[in-house]
Image (cartoon, rainbow, N blue to C red):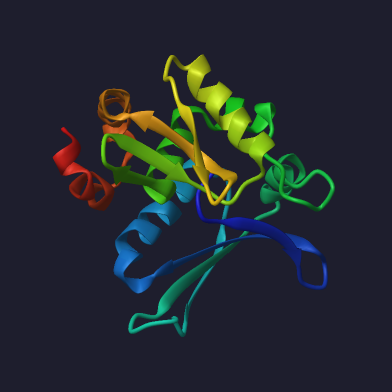
Amino acid sequence: MGRGSISLRGRRRGPWLEICRPETERSYLLHQIKQLRQCHDGPLEVVHDRLPGAGFYDDERVRVRSEALRRAYELLYPRDERVLSERVLSIVGQQGLAALWSDQAELNGNFVVFKMRRSPEEVELLRSWLQGMGRMSEPWPSKGKIQGFKVRLITGRKMYRSLMPLLHGDVRKNWRSLC
């Protein structure tokens, strides 16, 4: 749901999860790795490295390898192309919504906007998933295309309060003004 991708790499075509963030978000990146270790049965092979960034700050990259990621790859990339499905959304639940909030939510006037690079069908699927949870949303058009969705500030506050225990401290600090 957030900023990560799974790909098959190496000689044995094993699954690797790659997450890349600016070094200013390092504590959140380490929090994500900690969550992966808590949820994962068995050992994880974790590789940290630093990439040159576009600006002053470098990017921190973490690559995680485990055979258990193969099932996640099969769900998210059914034909070697990333696709969001109802099955994936039913599995990720509130944790997935918290990751979506952390990575793609912005405060814009009287709305909390989720800007994303997904197809209009996937945006509509996310909207219907949220409505199934009792949270109404509207499409967010930009440059003539649907670029995400928005929720009213009142709904955003309720969502934020319900997600607070799942959000990292840095994310909570950035959204303090919402409550």
Look at the image and tell me in which quarter the N terminus lies.
Answer: top right
Q: Between residues 52 and 124, which one lies in front from this camera angle?
A: 124
Which residue corresponds to the image point at 34% horizontal and 66% vertical from the top-left?
A: 26
Which residue corresponds to the image point at 35% horizontal and 73% vertical from the top-left?
A: 23
Residue 161, image quadrant: top left
Where does the image place residue 88, in percent across and percent down from the top left? 64, 33
Where does the image place residue 146, in percent across and percent down from the top left? 58, 42
Where does the image place residue 130, in percent across and percent down from the top left? 49, 24
- The reply, left or right, for residue 64 in relation to residue 37 is right
Which residue corresponds to the image point at 44% horizontal and 81% vertical from the top-left?
A: 53
- The reply, left or right, for residue 32 in relation to residue 81 is left
Q: In this rendering, is residue 106 above or below 18?
A: above
Look at the image and tell me in which quarter the C terminus lies.
Answer: top left
Residue 108, image quadrant: top left
Q: In this rendering, is residue 160 above or below 52?
A: above
Q: Between residues 146 and 124, which one lies in front from this camera angle?
A: 146
For the view shown, which residue lies furthest in the front direction? 144
Where does the image place residue 155, in percent across and percent down from the top left? 32, 23
Total numbered labels = 0
Which residue corresponds to the image point at 62% horizontal and 47% vertical from the top-left?
A: 118
- The reply, left or right, for residue 14 in relation to residue 55 is right
